[in-house]
Image: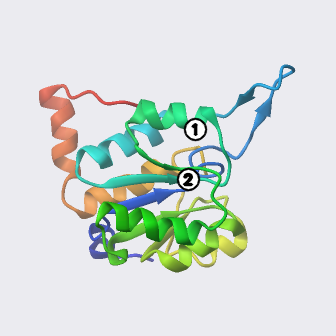
């Protein structure tokens, strides 16, 4: 189990997409159009993290206009698609952002995410991750992929940094609004 002090060190949260930000389903329509389901609470968690100085990157093995659209909605500009070697891409993303690997976390759900786990200082997995991935994660979420797992991690990081109460207060008193 990770300690709050460890969550507080995170400056870059890199996320796999399918199975982490979504439930892993890919719906293909009759006209070959694709559909994926994203959780708005995950989206708000990402927005809150970024607004409070945490960099967010998406690292996915697929190309999807849907993912690019969702990233644009949330203001995530660090998007890496068609990635075969996620560990290498994670290191490159951290270098581009000037963030040391000691401050990098990666969240993944399946075997192809393990190379990124081995490079990140901290690794997270949704509740429904592959058993081999969950066994190697520093923290396994109570929530499943696409059902609030990303929000759970974002909240833990923000609470550990002592920012959460101020965020809640901002909504209560100042009427903040965010992308979801």
- Give the number of callouts: 2
Q: Which structural element holds mark 2?
A: loop
Spatial separation of the CA atoms under disc 2 and disc 1: 21 Å
Pointer 1 residue: 67
Q: Toward which corner of the image does residue 37 lie, by quadrant?
A: top right
Marks 2/1 in contact by CB < 8 Å: the verdict is no
**Residue placed farthest to the right in the image?**
30
Residue 99 pos. (x, y %): 30, 68
Judge left or right: residue 145 versus residue 175.
right
What residue is disc 2 on?
143
Location of residue 52 with respect to 179 vertically, above or below = below
Seen at 19% across and 48% down, the residue is 165
Disc on the earlier residue, 2 or 1: 1
Q: Is 92 left, or right, of 85 in this rendering?
A: left
Extreme residue in the left direction: 173
Crowding near pointer 1: few (<14 within 10 Å), some, many (20+)? Answer: many
Q: Residue at x 38, y 38 (%)?
A: 44
Give 118 or 85, whichever is nearer the viewer: 85
Q: Is residue 92 left or right of residue 137?
A: left
Q: How is the protein colored in the picture?
A: rainbow
Position in image of residue 51 (x %, y %): 25, 43
Residue 154, relative to residue 135: is it above or below? above
């Amino acid at each position: 189990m990770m300690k709050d002090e460890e969550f507080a060190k995170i400056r870059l949260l890199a996320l796999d997409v399918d199975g982490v930000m979504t439930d892993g389903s890919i719906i293909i329509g009759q006209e070959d159009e694709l559909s994926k389901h994203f959780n708005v609470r995950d989206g708000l968690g990402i927005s809150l993290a970024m607004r409070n100085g945490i960099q967010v990157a998406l690292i996915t093995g697929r190309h999807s206009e849907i993912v690019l659209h969702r990233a644009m909605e949330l203001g995530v500009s660090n998007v890496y698609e068609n990635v075969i070697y996620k560990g290498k891409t994670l290191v490159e993303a951290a270098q581009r952002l000037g963030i040391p690997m000691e401050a990098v976390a990666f969240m993944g759900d399946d075997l192809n995410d393990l190379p990124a786990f081995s490079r990140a200082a901290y690794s997270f997995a949704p509740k429904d991750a592959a058993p081999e991935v969950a066994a190697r994660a520093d923290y396994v979420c109570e929530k499943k992929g696409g059902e609030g797992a990303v929000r759970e991690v974002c909240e833990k990081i923000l609470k550990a940094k002592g920012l959460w109460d101020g965020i809640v207060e901002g909504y209560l008193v100042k009427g903040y609004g965010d992308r979801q």
